[in-house]
Every structure is written in C-alpha cells, then in structure tokens.
Image (tube, rainbow, N blue to C red):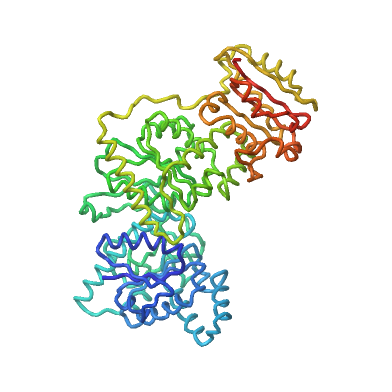
Amino acid sequence: MQVFFNFRGAELRNSVVAHLAKALKENGVKAAYVDAGDSKNPIFYEMEESRVAIVIFSRRYTESVWCLQELVKIKERVELGKLVAIPVYYKLDPSEVKELEGDFGLNLWNDIKRTSEFGKLEKWKGALDFFSQMRGLVFNEKSNERDFVTSTTKHLINVLSRISVEQTEKPRNWLSDQKHGDAFMNSSRSDNLKVVDVEEDSILCDTKSDGNSKEVESIQPEAKSRKGDDFLGEANFDATFNLQNCVENERVGDPISEGKKEENVSESSTTVSYHKPQPERKVFINFRGDDLRYGFVGHLVTALKMDGVNVDVYTNETRGKDLGSLFEMIEESQIALVILSSKYTESHWCLNELVKIKQLMEEGKLVVVPIFYKLESSEVKQLKGDFGANFWNLWRISRDDHIIKWKEALEHVASMNGIIYSNEHSSESEFITISVKKVLEIISLQEGESTELSTERGETHKNYLNKQHLVGVEQRITQLEEKLEFDSNKTRIVGVVGMPGIGKTTLAMTLHEKWNCRFLHCVPLLDIRKKSEDYGSVWLRKTLLEVLLEGKFPEISDKTTHESMKDKLLQNKVFIVLDDVSDKTQLEFLLGDLDWIKKGSKIVITTSD
C-alpha cells in the first residue's frame, strides 16, 4: 500500500510531510511524492501506484504549475474510483481555496500571467473547486504538529486497511462515498474531532466533554452538522487536531511496542506519557516558542519517550510558578538539551534557565547538548542577526541585572560541540533521529560510569537584592544616593569598601534596581574578580562596551577601546556598577582615561581592597 502526497515547498517537505512519511514507513506503508524538477517521467507513476492521496493546500501551493498538474490527475483518478483523496488546509482558510482569495488566489493568477498557460486554467480551477467541495482537515497556527502526525497516521492506516478489505469484497465507488458522506470506516471514529464542511461554508467543532477536553463552540454560529458528516469516519479527517481544543482519548496501538502502549496527551503539555516504567535519568529541554513546542520539540519528546527516556518540558502551568520550581526540574535531570532558535533571546525565562544549566554543568551535575535550530553557532556566540537583536531588545525592556550572566552563558554553549540544523533542505525527522541517538549515547556512557552523579544541589540562584539580611540598609542607601547626587547633572564615581560578606553587592544592586530607569545606558558588571580570572581583563572591557552600546555597533572586538568608541559613548549618560574589583588594572581596562564618560554619569565600585 502507498500514500501519495501533493504539496508545495521545502517547509512542508522537511517538517509535516517528513514526519508523516517516517510514521507511515514504521507502519509498513510507503509515502510517495514527486519533487518538482525530477527528471523521471511520467510524473504520475507514483500517484497511480497509490490508493490514498493527501492534498496539502498552503498559501504557496498555487505558485507551482507542477502541483496543479498533479491535482488535475488526482481529480481524474478520484472520479474513476481508483483513489481516495483527503484535502488538508495547512495554515490556510478553506474559503481561500474555494473562492481563490488571498495569496492563494493571487499566486494562481501570477502563474497564468507568467506561463501564459491559459488553456490549462480551466482545468486547474476545476480541480481546485472539486476538492474545495470535499470535507478535509484544517491545520492552523495553534495546531499541535506532533498530535497531528500521530492521529493522521492512525487514520491513514485505518483507511488503507478498510480499502484492502473492501477491494476483496466488492468494487466501490469512492467518489460517491466522498461526495455523499457514506459512513465508510466509521467503526472506530474518534469523538473529539473538528468537522470541516466547505460545502456549507462552515467550520464546526464536534467535541465531547470528557473531563480532560473542553466543549468547543462552533466558529460560525449558523454552522450545523449533517447526516453525511461521517464520510470516512476518522479517516476523512473531519477534524483539526488542536492541543488546546482537541485531545485524543482513545487507545492508540503503537507498532514499535506491538500495541502495548497507551498514549495520553494533556491539553497544556507537549510531553507524552506512556504507561511503562521510566528510567531514573531525565532529560530537560530548554527552548522558546509555541512553534517549537507544537512542532520540533513535540516530535522530539515523543521520539525520546518511545526510546524509554524520561523527559521534562515546562508546561504553561509551570511558567506560572517561580524560578525555584523550574530550577528543581533542571536539578533533577542528568541531560539538558538547549534548543537555540532565532526567538530564543526574546525570553528572559529561557536565559535564566540557561544560566542555571551552565551552573550545574560546571559543577559536573549536568551534561549539556546545544541544538542550533536553523541558526549558526556564530550568531549565538557573537549575538548576530535576529538572535542578537532580540537579546538587546530584551535588555532594553527588562533591564534585568542578569544581563552579563546571560551573555556569558550564551557564549559558553555556543563554543560547545552541538547539533546543527540550519539547512532548510534537511529533513526534520532525520534531525530528530540524530538528536535522539546523541541522547542515548550520553545515557549509555553515564550508566557505564563507576560513580553516580552527585545528588547534592547548589544554590538555585543568588539574590543580590535580599535586603532583609543587611542591617541598616535604608540608611546606607540614603548615604550613597547623597554622594552620587542622582538629581544633579554632576559626574560621580563612588567606591564602597569593606570586608567580604557585609552586603556591598546588595547595596550597589539595590541602587541599580532603583535608578537604572533614569539612564539610557547602564551596566551591572558583577563578580569582576572571578570573571577576570576566568576570562581576562580584555573580555571584561569588551563586554562592558557591548552592553553600554546595547549591541548597536557590531565592530566591537577584543581590540576595541573606549577611545575608538568615544563619540558614541559621549552621547548618553551611563550608570555602571563594577562589583568586587580586586586589582587596579581591572579599573584601567574598564574605565580607561575617563574622558569617554558623559557629564552626569554615575559609577559605583565595590571592593574589599
């Protein structure tokens, strides 16, 4: 048996189609499609060998004459009763196909203008209109790709099984069944399905409440179900598999474990729990964005769990708790997968997780695997492109005092050997296979070690603003404010000197939290003694300049000095905290000759010297 895919673009080929093809192959079904430009002819051979065709309509679908020619052939074979066709509307409203609206319609007319294929226009429009009358599946921006692939595969297997049975019994008019809603293959229909009926210009939600999923109201008030809505039952995808609105509740047989697993998908979590003993070793996944959660990460979690790996991924509920709760999840793990994407640095939450991950790695309690998802490692290390722009925008908005730690952690993971998925022509399913293999190799090495990983946990985070343990803090802050003269336009550099542990850093950071909003450029450079030992004074100067200029000038390097940036630095007053300075040379590197400091700037230096 074979399923033919008709679609447009590398985006689909390398994601949804690749995952479906892999899942079908694991179930003994071949997935076939023809790449545009393939020299093999005739182009319809693979289609003629298939029993089911999946037609994936996307915004770019009508850019391709090839796709439209395939669609005409699919229509012919459906009309001959030789093929069952299932339309899928991928991030596209069904009405755009029916009415040739939006980019979908515009691309079709542009095709005609470009190719002058006016003779074929009527056939193309006829085929598009033909399939727009069928009920199919809508995959929208909020759909969970992993759930979509799992459920779609199950339905396709059922369709092919029933086709095989029906072919041995008697001939069947597939077109009549599809057009008129014969209850074909309705024996295992799922109750939690969204019905798409384009004939009545309506989208219905047919979802039953079972305690886990919520009843969904119809998207269009006048929409109503018909008697014929059972066409192909679960196989015709009278449905959209959406993580928030639709939960698969029935038992799903898993071929890998010979049907012994039961899958249970929650509304808010991307994890899949199988009813089998889980190993003690855990993998924590650090990433940003619902596009990854419902796509790549969802598939990765499923693949890891199917190989018996215990996975922790934050849920929407987790994000409502404090960082300490999340840090506990990280501390209980032995491996952390850090998935760096262009949107990663939009989130201070992700960056704070990364700082904790780096801390545990340095303590020898965690193995870290960076995954560069459609991103080069140099973009992470040097804060370039959208990744860097998002980082500096986040800093401008939040003014979080962890800015230097974020930057340090990003540089650290970027220098590690990771897994790179940056080629848009790579198959995402193959990339997931590589990632899972890497995790399993690490687990194998860990289990072979003679000593267990330490279970002692370090301090979850250092709270520099814990004023409860600083006696007389209000009085000290008032004294510092008087010396710094924040309300005047005078430049002030003030040193806070004292023995370690008496609260100098807390005092300085309290001031920073209170007054940084008054300055366009500010830097809290903490732990200078340690950072000087670990990275050197040149790194300190480069970091100070980068944060002061908020990444606006990419020419900053190890050789950049205050003098070379003097004109830009003098444009704005600055507020700088230099914490735990231990040597005069550190100040020479960090402050230079002081002639770059605009009048009205404030600098606080803490030291035990």
Q: Position of residue 310 (x, y in %)?
A: 32, 41
Quick check: 511 left or right of 53? right
Tally of numbered tags: 0
Q: Quadrant of the N terminus?
A: bottom left
Quick check: 39 left or right of 166? right
Which residue does the image show at 47% across and 59% down from the upper left?
140
Q: Position of residue 367 (x, y in %)?
A: 37, 37
In the displayed structure, 474 sits above or below 530; it is: above
Location of residue 360 (image quadrant): top left
Quick check: 367 left or right of 581? left
| Residue farthest toward the right in the current orientation of the protein | 489
Which residue does the image show at 25% across and 30% down from the upper left?
450
Q: Position of residue 276 (x, y in %)?
A: 24, 43
In the displayed structure, 517 sits above or below 92; it is: above
Location of residue 457 (image quadrant): top left
Frontmost residue, 158 versus 383: 383
Q: Quadrant of the C terminus?
A: top right
| Residue farthest toward the bottom in the current orientation of the protein | 119
Q: Position of residue 391 (x, y in %)?
A: 58, 42
Frontmost residue, 432 versus 377: 377
In the displayed structure, 414 sits above or below 509; it is: below
